[in-house]
Image: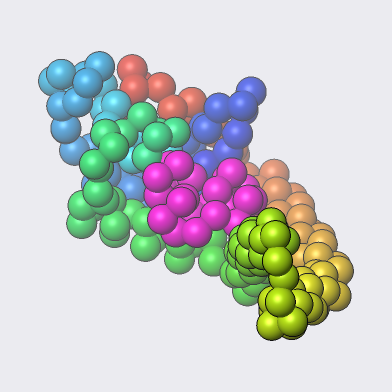
Amino acid sequence: MKIFSIQDGNIVLEREEVALIKEFNNLLRRVIPCEGDPKGNLKLRAFQEFNYIYQVLDYNSFPNKRGLTEEEAHLWAVENAGLPSDWIADPIVLKAMEKYEELIQSPSRDLCRELLITLNNSYRIVRKIRDMIDAKLKSDEITNEDLDILINYQNKLLAIADKLPNTITTLKEVEKLIEYEEDNSKQIARGGDEVLDSMNPDTSL
């Protein structure tokens, strides 16, 4: 079951699917006043929260494609969705997130997410080691102990570089598997009626 898609660069909410799932329907139906929607009748906050759910959980979202950490993904999603900077998911949003994660979960997607995070962390580690090497090399006097440290740092960099090609190859294979799964899902969906409706707060269930 798919409740999000992208049209012309915008997130689209397939509202007939939302109406069929209690956790999503509960989120969309509640009325929460917010900036730009003082009475809450336009459901702007609900659409912002759906945007957040997509950004944090969906395989195709920017945070997941970039392998951001949970904290980084949260901060990015809050800003992208236009939510207040101190916004925290309440029980209704958390229930909707749990349900969405349940619906989209697959071994290939889970593995892909972990591989992307691993690659992102590898970059962070390499950058840290490079900073430590640069700091040592800036010293006017380098002792034998310093040389041993530098060689150790360099060996760690080479060890990481040696493993990265295999990780990248595995990631590409997993991404192909995900594409295959999504193509099959689309072919199945074509057998039924597909109704798309943009995430327009002016349109309610």
The reply to whether residue 41 is in sight is no
Foreground: 154 or 107? 154
Q: Position of residue 75 (x, y in %)?
A: 40, 45
Q: Residue furthest front?
A: 141
The reply to whether residue 110 is in sight is yes
Q: Position of residue 114 (x, y in %)?
A: 61, 69
| Residue 99 is inside the magenta segment | no
Horizontal side of residue 129 vs 45, given as left or right: right
Q: Is residue 140 above or below residue 89?
A: below
Instruction: For the C terminus, give its image quadrant.
Output: top left
Horizontal side of residue 50 vs 26, given as left or right: right
Q: Is residue 117 above or below residue 81?
A: below
| Residue 64 is inside the magenta segment | yes
Q: Which residue shows up at 37% across the image and 40% down it?
A: 78
Say which quarter of the image contains residue 160. Answer: bottom right
Q: Which residue shows up at 64% across the image and 23% down it?
A: 8
Foreground: 122 or 200? 122
Say which quarter of the image contains residue 104. Answer: bottom right
Residue numbers of the magenta segment: 52-77
Foreground: 58 or 103? 58
Q: Main secondary structure of the magenta part?
A: helix
Horizontal side of residue 141 vs 45, given as left or right: right
Horizontal side of residue 107 vs 176, given as left or right: left
Q: Which residue shows up at 29% across the image and 59% down it?
A: 95
Q: Position of residue 29 (x, y in %)?
A: 23, 37
Instruction: Please name the colour scheme applied to the rendered image.
Output: rainbow
**Count of marks overlaid on the render:** 0
Q: Which residue shows up at 44% across the image and 59% down it?
A: 70
Q: Position of residue 66 (x, y in %)?
A: 63, 51
